[in-house]
Amino acid sequence: MSGPDRLQSDRLRADLGQVTTIGSEIVVLEETESTNDAVRDMAAKGCPEGLVVFAEYQTAGRGQRENRWVSAPGKALCFSVLLRPELPIEDSARLTQWAAETVAATIQSSCGIEAVIKSPNDIYVRGRKVAGVLVEMKAQPRAAHLAVLGIGLNVNQAVEDFPLELRERATSLAIVTGSRQDRHPLAVALLRDLDQTYQRIARR
């Protein structure tokens, strides 16, 4: 994908500025099966906590309970974050709640749209799903557990970009606002908000 709306890792990193954890390293892939899987592979190679991987297109994106996450190329924000929270693995639901609350708050502050959480992991606007989060956690021997947080946010999809079976249940920020959204500042706002709120949940 090319053009002014393409996400760029160096620009995202520069505009994000100093962070505590999330966004310390940012990678943008043109295409991958799943950003969660990409982050897990990078974690196995020793990448640090806070790594973020965006994909312009996922061929096998997934949501809760192995549901498929479908997104038109270049029209959403699909990314995953490598985390090493100091939490018992049975408390992984707290990470899901934190992420969903942060995404909903960022939508409201950045777009002026009221977003509500449909427990445990979906974010709705005007009765339709606009975003979802997926946390996959794995125990690590003698170390903080590894968690991969995946987020999918529908940004610039038109109704026809959704499969027929989803058109009555899904929406995008562009559909709701009636205008195209700039994905770059929205991505920066999401990462900044996630970074600023992460310490409250991860170190208890």
Image: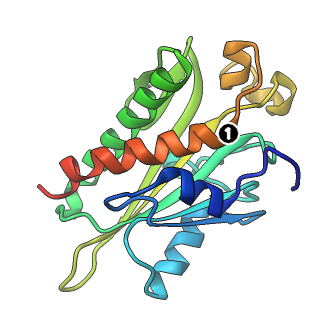
Under circle 1, the secondary element is: helix
Q: Is residue 10 above or below residue 61?
A: below
Q: Is residue 136 above or below residue 37?
A: above
Q: How was this image coloured?
A: rainbow
Q: Nearer the viewer, residue 144 or 2?
A: 2
Quadrant in the rendering for residue 50: bottom left
Identified at 21% across, 58% down, the residue is 90
Around disc 1, counting alpha carbons within 10 Å, would you say few (fewer than 14), some (14 to 19), or many (20 or more)? some
- Determine whether, in the image, residue 155 is placed left or right of residue 129: right
- Residue 123 at what x, y percent from top left? 49, 28
Q: Quadrant of the C terminus?
A: bottom left
Can residue 118 be seen here? The reply is yes
Quadrant in the rendering for residue 165: top right
Identified at 27% across, 80% down, the residue is 140
Q: Nearer the viewer, residue 114 or 167?
A: 114
- Determine whether, in the image, residue 20 is placed left or right of residue 158: left
- Residue 23 at what x, y percent from top left? 46, 60
Identified at 40% across, 27% down, the residue is 105
- Residue 185 at what x, y percent from top left? 60, 39
- Determine whether, in the image, residue 85 is placed left or right of residue 96: left
Q: How many marks?
A: 1
Q: Residue furthest left?
A: 204
Can residue 93 be seen here? The reply is no
Q: Nearer the viewer, residue 58 or 12?
A: 12
Identified at 36% across, 33% down, the residue is 101
Q: Quadrant of the N terminus?
A: bottom right
List the residue tagged with mark 1: 183
Q: Amino acid at mark 1?
A: Arg
- Residue 196 at what x, y percent from top left? 31, 46
